[in-house]
């Protein structure tokens, strides 16, 4: 879902937090939600029940959507742009948990318990988000139990992702984690190229290092070693994956 009409600005004015609230029709919001794995399987009636109370906001590059520890009251859907979800230690060390693109959702746990955010989310490029509050979600559940089932399935996927990430930190060395990350990104968002799969990540090597729990210099060395073997070709923030099978073997996939 690279482009959605529901993300286009209609009569907007800057909000108090620097974000721009959009006035977008419910049909456009339905189109946005239909493109997500969370709500895409819903029938028209429950999908519309979710879309009707949603709001839409645009964020500038560098803005924080929410901080780790903030109260959690809202689910977000990426309509356009790029979001980074990360956790920060007391010493200021950062680990990137995910980068999210159009069609991705985040903040699902807020719909369950309204507890504090377990991670932070920031904007890597101008981004438009669809917002669904916990109270609005609870209201939409009335008469539409399939919405709850869709949420539970989404939380199951999230839990599996977290468990896999934790397992990789324990059982894979850093080179293996870098290889697995590149394979996963190639499958999720790579563009076919005559020499392989092209990744236009909009991420620095520091961001990549935070995604695998390593340091930038070490990850840079690993990328250079992969490049020397012909597995990849690094071109700034773009990576051409020429031998995904070899990377898969290195990651134990």
Image (tube, grey):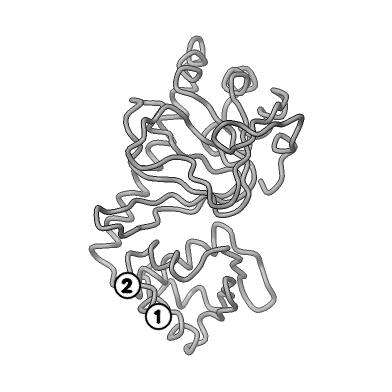
Residue drawn at x 46%, y 84% is 224
Contact check, label 2 and label 1, Cβ < 8 Å: yes
Category of crowding for the residue at label 1, using alpha-carbon neighbours closer than 10 angstroms: few (below 14), some (14–19), many (at least 20): some
Q: Which mark is residue 174?
A: 2
Please, is residue 127 above or below residue 54 in the view?
A: below
Image quarter where the C terminus lies is bottom left
Where residue 13 appears, as percent x and y from the top left, is 69, 31
Q: Quadrant of residue 131?
A: top right
Q: Where's residue 181, x and y in %?
A: 43, 65
Residue 9 spot, x, y in % from top left: 74, 36
Residue lying at 55% horizontally and 54% vertically, measured from the top left: 124
Q: Residues within 10 Å of mark 2 (few under 14, many from 20)?
A: many
Callout 1: SS: helix
Q: Nearer the viewer, residue 39 or 62?
A: 62
| Number of numbered discs | 2
Camera-side residue of 195 and 208: 208
Residue ID for mark 1 = 222
For the residue pair 191 and 67, the one nearer the viewer reads as 67
Question: What mark, if any, has residue 20 been given in the picture?
Answer: none
Tell me which numbered mark, 2 or 1, is placed earlier along the sequence. Answer: 2
Which residue is at a point 64% across and 45% down the rendered structure image? 80
- Marks 2 and 1 sit apart, C-alpha to C-alpha, by 8 Å
Up/down of 67 relative to 136, above or below: below
69 in relation to 110, above or below: below
**Residue in the picture at 49% in, 13% down:** 139
């Amino acid at each position: 879902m690279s482009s959605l009409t529901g993300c286009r600005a209609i009569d907007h004015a800057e909000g108090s937090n620097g974000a721009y609230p959009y006035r977008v029709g419910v049909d456009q919001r339905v189109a946005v939600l239909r493109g997500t794995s969370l709500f895409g399987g819903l029938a028209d009636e429950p999908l519309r029940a979710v879309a009707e109370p949603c709001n839409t906001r645009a964020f500038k590059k560098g803005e924080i959507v929410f901080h780790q520890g903030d109260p959690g009251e809202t689910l977000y859907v990426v309509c356009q742009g790029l979001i980074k979800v990360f956790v920060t230690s007391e010493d200021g060390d950062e680990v990137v948990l995910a980068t999210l693109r159009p069609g991705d959702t985040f903040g699902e746990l807020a719909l369950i318990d309204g507890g504090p955010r377990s991670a932070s989310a920031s904007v890597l490029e101008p981004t438009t988000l669809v917002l669904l509050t916990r109270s609005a979600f609870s209201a939409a559940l009335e008469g539409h139990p399939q919405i709850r089932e869709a949420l539970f399935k989404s939380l199951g996927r999230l839990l599996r992702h977290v468990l896999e990430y934790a397992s990789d930190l324990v059982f894979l060395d850093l080179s293996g984690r870098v290889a697995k990350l590149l394979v996963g990104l190639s499958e999720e968002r790579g563009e076919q190229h005559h020499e392989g799969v092209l990744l236009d990540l909009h991420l620095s090597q520091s961001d990549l290092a935070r995604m695998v729990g390593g340091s930038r210099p070490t990850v840079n060395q690993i990328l250079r070693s992969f490049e020397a073997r012909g597995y990849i070709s690094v071109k700034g923030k773009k990576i051409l994956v020429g031998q995904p099978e070899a990377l898969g073997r290195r990651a134990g996939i």
